[in-house]
Amino acid sequence: MERGLIWLPLLALFIGLAWAGWNEYQKVEAYRSWAQQFDRAKYDIYAVLGQRGDRITWGKPTRSGPVDLSGFSLQAVKSIKMWVDEQPVDLERPPETLNGGRIYLEFLLSPPDSAARIPFTQVSLALEWAKYLQQEWQKWQEKPPDGTLSQ
């Protein structure tokens, strides 16, 4: 009986880990079907993010698919910033070492003068997305109203 009492907490822990793994698998599968509509997409435990053309869409991953979806056009963006632990990161010259903490990309939007903050779990992934979206944003800023790229 003593051995049974020793193994019971381990059995409960194993069942809990198995459920957590299945739950995360369900989220990833729901994300996969959602992400097919985008040119570029990312998944992590904090947020899903998709980009198609000049539209950015993000939300919170769940087993039934992303919820709390929000979006904006890159044409409405005033600036893009990356923040790590409430400190801005220079995208042109990022520090050699960045400790993970609270990481997010911030998009200052116009005309409502609001900000969109998209969280990330990894500094390297956030930095990659920030640089990519900065380039895409600059392309859309160069477009005249007729939609053709200026040379």
Image (cartoon, grey):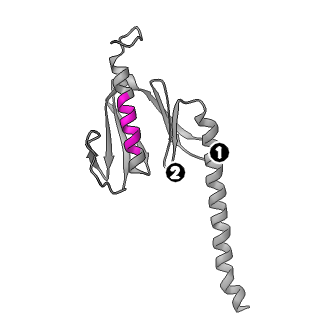
Residue furthest to the right:
1
Reading the image, the residue beneath label 1 is 29
Report crowding for label 2: few under 14, some 14 to 19, many 20 or more residues within 10 A (C-alpha): some
Q: Residue at x 27, y 39 (%)?
A: 92
Tell me if I can see residue 64 in this picture.
Answer: no
Q: Is residue 55 above or below residue 19?
A: above
Overall secondary structure of the magenta section = helix
> Residue 3 placed where, x, y %?
70, 89
> Residue 98 placed where, x, y %?
31, 54
Residue 17: give its label: none
Tell me if I can see residue 9 in this picture.
Answer: yes
Q: In this view, does 104 lie above or below 134?
A: below
Q: Which residue is drawn at 49% across and 45% down?
A: 47
> Residue 26 placed where, x, y %?
65, 49
Tell me the kind of residue under disc 2.
Ile
Q: Which of 111 and 82 is in front in this view?
A: 82
Residue 45: give its label: 2
* Residue 8 left/right relative to 126: right
Per the image, is 45 magenta?
Answer: no
Q: Which residue is drawn at 41% across and 39% down?
A: 129
SS at circle 1:
helix
Tell me the kind of residue under disc 1.
Glu
Per the image, is 133 magenta?
Answer: yes
Using the numbered discs, state the Cα–Cα distance from disc 1 to disc 2 in whole angstroms. Answer: 13 Å
Lower sequence index among marks 1 and 2? 1
> Residue 84 placed where, x, y %?
32, 50
**Which residues make up the magenta segment?**
126-135
Quadrant in which the N terminus appears: bottom right
* Residue 42 left/right relative to 138: right
Residue furthest to the top:
146
Report crowding for label 1: few under 14, some 14 to 19, many 20 or more residues within 10 A (C-alpha): some
